[in-house]
Image: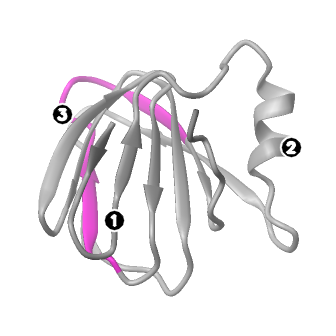
Amino acid sequence: MISSPGKSVVVHSAAADLSDFRGLVERCMPQQGCVEVQNDQSGKEHPWHQHDTDETIVVLNGQLLFYWEGGEAVCKSGDVIELPKGVRHGSKASFGDVQYLISFANVDFAR
């Protein structure tokens, strides 16, 4: 687990069960809204930005360089990123194509 001081970004290694995709989607579904499945080709970057809601990201396939004010991590399949609202962050598919699920809600994957 990697965390950052202040508004804590937490990365849980291998925390998501990827063998049950439907169960994963149901777990990540907010009370109101949707989940997004993102497919980034190698080299695609989402530069610095922030959201006014909490966000949970689950890496489904590949590796994602995820960075935020105060840290960065290379996240791989099964890793979960818990991102509090208001934290500036970005990501890059630095190691080939990557697919990940995004929930605009806090989904607790702590073990």
Across and down, in percent, residue 9 comes to: 34, 59
> At x 35% / y 35%, what residue is drawn?
41
> At x 13% / y 55%, what residue is drawn?
71
**46 or 14, nearer to the observer:** 14
Asked if disc 3 and disc 1 are in contact, CB closer than 8 Å, the reply is no
Name the residue carrying label 3: 94
Which amino acid type is marked by label 2? Glu
Which residues are drawn in magenta? 87-100
Query: Which-is-in-front pick, marks 2 and 1?
Result: 1
Instruction: Tell whether 72 sits left or right of 102.
Output: left
Q: Assign the N terminus to one quadrant of the image.
A: top left
Per the model, the C-alpha gap separating discs 2 and 1 is 25 Å
Q: Which mark is residue 26?
A: 2
Q: Which mark is residue 55?
A: none
Does any portion of residue 46 appear in the rendered image?
no
Neighbourhood count class around disc 1 (C-alpha, 10 Å): few under 14, some 14–19, many 20 upward: some
Per the model, the C-alpha gap separating discs 3 and 1 is 24 Å
